[in-house]
Image (cartoon, grey):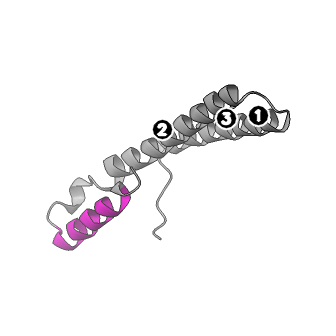
Amino acid sequence: MTKTKQHHSHKDVLLRLKRVQGHLAKVIQMIDEQEGCLKISQQLYAVEKAIIQAKKNIIHDHIEHCLEDPAIKNNKDKQTSNLKEFKEITKYL
């Protein structure tokens, strides 16, 4: 796996995921305390949506900052590599 520099959006995603971590801990507590299934399902849905949004932000940021590099315009090998990476990352959308 290629290591790349951290993008500006990573900080926001990290904060979002830390909130999700706390939220998920609360859901686990709700289950332990035998809260109603409706409330638990609502909270799990919120956790799921937050994770999906974090994932989208990471993927979109990668596409914008790593795959749209104008310096590779005349480099066929890099273009091929970026196209392959683009196809690979879209599996996670």
Q: Nearer the viewer, mark 1 or mark 3?
A: 1
Residue lying at the far left in this picture: please name it: 74
**Residue nearer the viewer, 48 or 31:** 31
Range of residues picked out in magenta: 75-89
Q: Earlier in the sequence, mark 1 or mark 3?
A: 3
**Label drawn at residue 19:** 3
| Quarter where residue 75 is shown | bottom left
Q: Is residue 33 magenta?
A: no
- From what the image shows, is residue 65 above or below residue 41? below
In the rendered structure, the answer to whether residue 35 lies left or right of residue 37 reads right
**Residue nearer the viewer, 88 or 35:** 35
Question: Distance from label 1 to label 3 (Cα)?
Answer: 11 Å
Q: Is residue 82 magenta?
A: yes
| Quarter where residue 80 is shown | bottom left
* Predominant SS along the magenta part: helix
Pointer 2 local density, CA inside 10 Å: few below 14, some 14–19, many at least 20: some
In the rendered structure, the answer to whether residue 75 lies left or right of residue 84 reads left
- From what the image shows, is residue 87 above or below residue 52? below
**Label drawn at residue 53:** 2
Amino acid, disc 2? Gln
Residue lying at the far bottom in this picture: please name it: 77
Q: Earlier in the sequence, mark 2 or mark 1?
A: 1
- From what the image shows, is residue 93 above or below residue 50? below
Q: Which residue is mark 1?
A: 26
Q: Earlier in the sequence, mark 3 or mark 2?
A: 3
